[in-house]
Image (cartoon, helix red, strand yellow):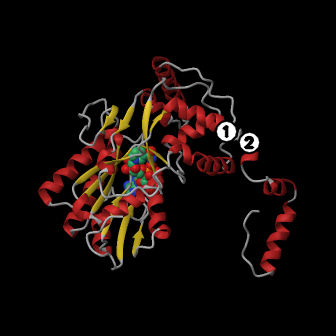
Amino acid sequence: MAQTDAAQTTRRLGVLIGGSGLVGGTIVNYFKSRTTAPIDILAPSSKKLSIREPADIKSYLTTVKPDFIINTAIANIDSDSQMSYEINYSGPINLAMTAAELNIPYIHLSSAATLKTGQNIDETQTREFSHKMSNYAKTKLMTEKTLEYLHKKAGLDYSCIRLSVVYGNHDHKIQGFHRMLFSIADESMPFLFTSKGVHHSYSNCRKLPYFIHHMIDNRQEFSGQTYNFADRLHVNLPDLILTIKSYLQLRRPYEIYVPYQMANIGKRCTSALLRVMRNFGLKANLPPELIFIRNFYTTQTLNTDKLQGSSFEDPMPNETVYTRMPDMVIYYLTRWSQQNLITTYDEEIRSDGTFEQDFKHRPEILLEQMHKSISAGTSNTEIK
Ligand SMILES: NC(=O)c1ccc[n+]([C@@H]2O[C@H](COP(=O)([O-])OP(=O)(O)OC[C@H]3O[C@@H](n4cnc5c(N)ncnc54)[C@H](OP(=O)(O)O)[C@@H]3O)[C@@H](O)[C@H]2O)c1
């Protein structure tokens, strides 16, 4: 790693917003158990500190007096304009203004949704505002622009990291890439809802905390800067879907490409059906993969030259969404089948099934094991 701004020997305290999320959770885990650097991290839940409440932000941060702030919070992807505005725009800006007042760095997580589509898109190629933009993309772009403004006008020390399609463990909401993995594993994707040749960039969640840590230690280089944070590999979407399918040894999705117009008609019909269902008091929203169906048909790959040219050294240079696949498949399929979300999962991939068999047919064995371990004074109640 490159030389840091100062020898960081004094203990530092960071505040992270959004710690229960995929990205925030991974960053908290890194600071708590992966790095040996003297850094403590506080991750208040949205119930304790909602960034929709400006007064709460101010009082929390002025009381805690952190050395840096990381913001990974976002509103649900299908939130209305008010909620999106408050969580994705005014909340982050209030955090940033407090950071400027306290004279501490503010690290903001943003998205490639603020960038144009196409190949090799660099940090400068942001979208123009338009009424067609989703609430998510619009509010993320507004935040990026105001952070830049605050940097110039109020001396805010900030860094902005744009993520593309994020992959990693612990996505409890099953969004983005993991929603696609879910649809394939659940065999609810009968055909390929994409076109040949569609490519996307992917961001490895495991690597991100190393970059953030490096940015915090090197403010001179990273202050006021925005980076595309993505793997160098540009992923061919149909190939990725078919690789997952063959890895899981499934028959579907069949290698039939559904044209965008047809997929869009399907989306509109589903939307209409859900409107009817809501009249009967049923709560039903359009699934995110349908809201963003256009993305499956549009190439967007990010240029990462700025990241490669920085002093950050990739801790896992050979890792890609393909190399992480076996681990992610085991993690998510075990989790989803334990939650009874999928039933098509071949049990051979997970444990030997002893626990499931005992729990179903012989619970007294489990009782006996528990009682024995209590008598022996051990607390080892793990499932074998
Ligand atoms: N995941 C992706 O594929 C992807 C792709 C591109 C960019 N990104 C960016 O990465 C960042 C993190 O995304 P993610 O996927 O980790 O999101 P996520 O899993 O949906 O987590 C969102 C987090 O925001 C918190 N939050 C929501 N409302 C809040 C409020 N009012 N006050 C404080 N916290 C609040 C949530 O807390 P509660 O659970 O307590 O509500 C949760 O911890 C975002 O900036 C996103 O734009 C993600």
Residue 173 picture location, percent across and down: 52, 48
Q: Callout 2, which amino acid? A: Asp
Quadrant housing the N terminus: bottom left
Left or right of 187? Residue 91 is left
At mark 1, the secondary structure is: loop
- Residue count near mark 2 (Cα–Cα under 10 Å), binned few <14, some 14–19, many ≥20: few
Q: CB of residue at label 2: within 8 Å of ligand 1?
A: no
* Residue on which the image places disc 1: 248
Res. 22 in view: yes
Side (left or right) of 144 relative to 51: left
Camera-side residue: 265 or 56?
265
Give the distance between the C-alpha atoms of the residues marked 2 and 1, in whole angstroms: 8 Å
- Considering depth in this image, is 204 or 104 the residue closer to the camera? 204
Q: How many marks?
A: 2
Residue 186 visible? The answer is no
Tell me if residue 275 comes above or below residue 10 in the rendering. Answer: above
Name the residue that disc number 2 marks. Answer: 346
* Residues packed near mark 1 inside 10 Å, few (<14), some (14 to 19) or many (20 plus): some
**SS of the residue under disc 2:** loop
Q: Residue at x 31, y 45 (%)?
A: 305
Asked if marks 2 and 1 touch (Cβ < 8 Å), the reply is yes
Assign the C terminus to one quadrant of the image: bottom right
